Amino acid sequence: MDPPRTPDITGSAAISVSKASKSFLHQPALRDITLTLSAKSLTLLCGANGSGKSTLLRAIAGLSRLDSGSLSYSGAPKGAAPRALVGYLGHHLMLYPHLSVLENGEFAARMLGTACDIGAQLNEWGLEPHAHKRVHELSKGLQARAALMRIFIGEPAYLLLDEPTSALDEAGVEILARRIERLRAANEQCCVLIATHDIARLGSLAERVVVLGAGAILFDTENCDEIDSNRAREEAFNLYSRINR
Amino acid sequence: MKIFTLIKKDLLQELRAKESLAFMFSLSILFSVVLGIAVNSALLNQESVTKLFPGLLWVIFIFSATMTVERSLQNEMQHMALEGLLLLGVSSFQIFIAKLVSNTLLSGLGFLLCTFFLAILLDIGIVHVAAPFTLIASLTVIGYSALATVAVAISSSSQLKSLLLPLILIPLLFPLFFAATELGAVLFAGGAFDPASGWLSLLIALDVLYIVLGMNLYEYVIKE
């Protein structure tokens, strides 16, 4: 039986990450990360390249295992990511290049068991003229829109996006922002975490910003104006110095 | 129902991409011609060639099918589409079964091509053994596909990729192809097909083992 698309969130914490650590070939990617993401929240995850943003997102999505620490999701057994409730977009689009945009959308809807109106989704993302084109025939930007459309088909309760604006034009970013707002309005318990360098375009959506550096949380603020790249660099430098001492 | 949709998607991808099918067709012809010329040059009598036929056929099949299945699965893993499936709520069990079916169909087509070309080149009549040989071939192709599906996923997630695949796959396939060659040799030598044969039981047991192993291992190998 398909799992429900809305988690049974009894407390305010939708996702809890506790003392999460992970290394790749003895190079630490995450160091003792503890983070609680509440229901109804939208958090931006920032930091320099290699700071651990993507690793953290993949772990939260349940696509990679932590070396130590734990993750818990409201309404799911401890340690198990409620995959069907997660909308995750990483560096790969996770689309089938030889299927059309429409076929990719229909396939996702069938797998999720949702009676979603794919035509309306295509329209919303400006993909209607490209519906019957195969994904590999589209530009990078349109492919990114198709991948995002696929993510939103399931109305995910946990939305995890890794640099979603990197291939999008202004219109695409506007559609994304609108779609996130609509998702949050439809599901008040929705928890959104976006890894990005694009604070200029996504900052207005954020209620909280967490900055990572060298796999650790440098600072965590609910006031987006506090984000200052000089301060982030300084904190990262101090952390590196402490680690390498 | 999800499994049928997955199989349909896999086959549609293969048909449209054409890469795997064209690759398999070319490899089947190429390997059959090379081995056919080698055997004909050895000036063996027809009786010896007939005895050699099943073994040669499986050698060609292993190489052409492995390269084809690897190409097909690696394409999907490069786009992280398998992870995408997990996030659509598809279980690793469903993914494995769908991959097993589509790989069996793809490899089965490859086997038909290899049999056709090699039988023509070596002048071997196969019509008189068609029914029992189809049973043996089907069981072997199913066992092969189960193991290849897991092995390709393991090798794709390793840094060695294609280099690792034959090292994992061929030793594990050895009992399967040994049993298939023994059964085929008896058939082509004019012997009667024995449904109670120990080799046939071994073939069935290996199929069950590889499928159960695949169902249990697939979750771990497609996840980082």
Image: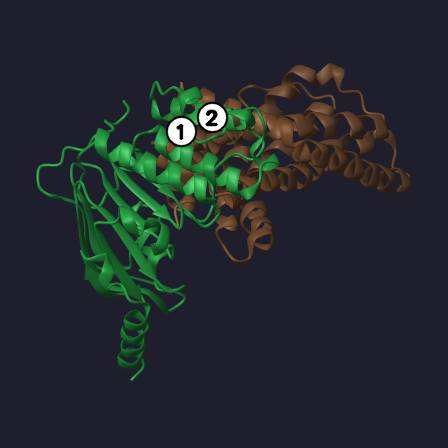
Chain colours: A green, B brown
Residue at disc 2, secondary structure? helix
Q: Is residue B16 above or below residue A22?
A: above
Mark 1 near mark 2, Cβ–Cβ under 8 Å? yes
The percent coordinates of residue B218 (x first, y second) are 41, 40
Q: Residue furthest bottom?
A: A245
Q: What residue is shown with label 2?
A: B6
Depth check: give the residue in front, B19 or B131: B19
Q: Quadrant location of residue A197?
A: bottom left
Chain hosting mark 1: B
Q: Quadrant of the N terminus of chain B?
A: top left
Three-letter residue code for mark 1: Gln
The label nearer to you, 1 versus 2, is: 2
Left or right: residue B41 versus residue B87 is: right
* Residue B80: x %, y % from top left: 47, 43
Q: Which mark is residue B94?
A: 1
Q: Nearer the viewer, residue A205 or A16?
A: A205
Residue drawn at 66 percent across, 35 percent down? B20
SS at mark 1? helix
Residue at the left extreme, as displayed: A11
The kind of residue tagged 2 is: Leu
